[in-house]
Amino acid sequence: MKQPYQRRQAQMQAGVATAEDGFVIMDGPDGVAVTMTAEAALGTGESLIAAAAVAQSQIARRTDEASGSA
Amino acid sequence: MFTERFMKNRRGILLERGERVRLEAAIEDVRTLHPRMTLVRAGEPLHQSLFLIEGIMSRHMDDGNGRRQLVAVHLPGDFVDLHGYPLKRLDHDVGTMTAATVAVVPHSAFDAIVADMPVMARKLWFATMLDAAMHRAWLFRLGRLDAIGRVAHSLSETNARLFSVGLSNGRRFVLGLTQADVAEICGLTHIHVNRVVRTLREQQLCLFRSSLVEILEPQRLAVRGQFDPHYLYLSDATADPSRSERSS
């Protein structure tokens, strides 16, 4: 049975990367399906980790501001 | 008859005998084609449309780096570029994927059919609307599904389409495509498709060996690919291939 309509939102689940024949395959989340060289996968992974750290700091700052204004 | 598979087993539409005779008479030439030939290039003026009698053809677009994205696959019984009749030039290329046999229908013959047989003209219009419905399903497939889902959807669709024209028994069909072709259809690399094909085999959903596809669990495969054949407008007799075991 179909679920009610929902707007596309940020994914809560991590994508899964696996190695295949010397390449890295990324499956998901949200329809992502990409094949990368090992070097490209390393670069993507580092970029993801760095961006995730910035995103977490943004959340922390927002939380601090919200509690300061309360 | 060359066109016996045209509009076969479609819901709410039936080509009457007189209409089929008229379509047959409209055929100017029948050509046998080699695999991997480009027949129509984007932007070229068109004066004829091609009806696919045997084989598999594609509509495709290449990106700036020459990487190909298939935007449609045509199977026996399809007009490949009927939309070229009103458009007069296409926005994509048309080519063979396998060896193929096509019937050539000049646009002047369609002019006469449209003038003389408005009901048949509407049926030809219906055929182009089917193409549009499949494009919408392909957008959904590429936009929403993961790699396994895309391949599952594509194989389920191909099975349903071939079943409707008698070229699948509902679970087994010959598909003269490579895994690299499936990759281009599904917007994946052939490495990714190789992995997906192995996974489908391990999950006992589908076997894809050389040019033979065997769907072990059609309904499970359809669920995995979120495939609902509604958009193919198949007759009730052929809407669910998994319920039949007729020989192809």
Image: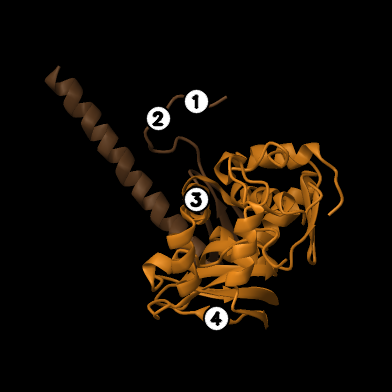
Q: Name the residue that disc number 4 marks.
A: B38
Badge 4 element = strand
Residue sitting at x 45%, y 35%? A12
Q: Residue most toward the top?
A: A70
Q: On the rendered image, what quadrant is the N terminus of chain B found in?
A: bottom right
Q: Quadrant of residue A10?
A: top left
Q: Name the residue that disc number 2 marks.
A: A6
The chain ID associated with circle 4 is B
The answer to the question of whether label 1 and label 3 lie on touching residues, with beta carbons closer than 8 A, is no
Marks 4 and 3: same chain? yes
Q: CA distance from mark 2 to mark 4?
A: 42 Å
> Which chain is brown in the picture?
A
* Residue type (three-letter) at the residue carrying disc 3: Val
Marks 1 and 2: same chain? yes
Q: Name the residue that disc number 1 marks.
A: A3
> Which chain is orange in the picture?
B
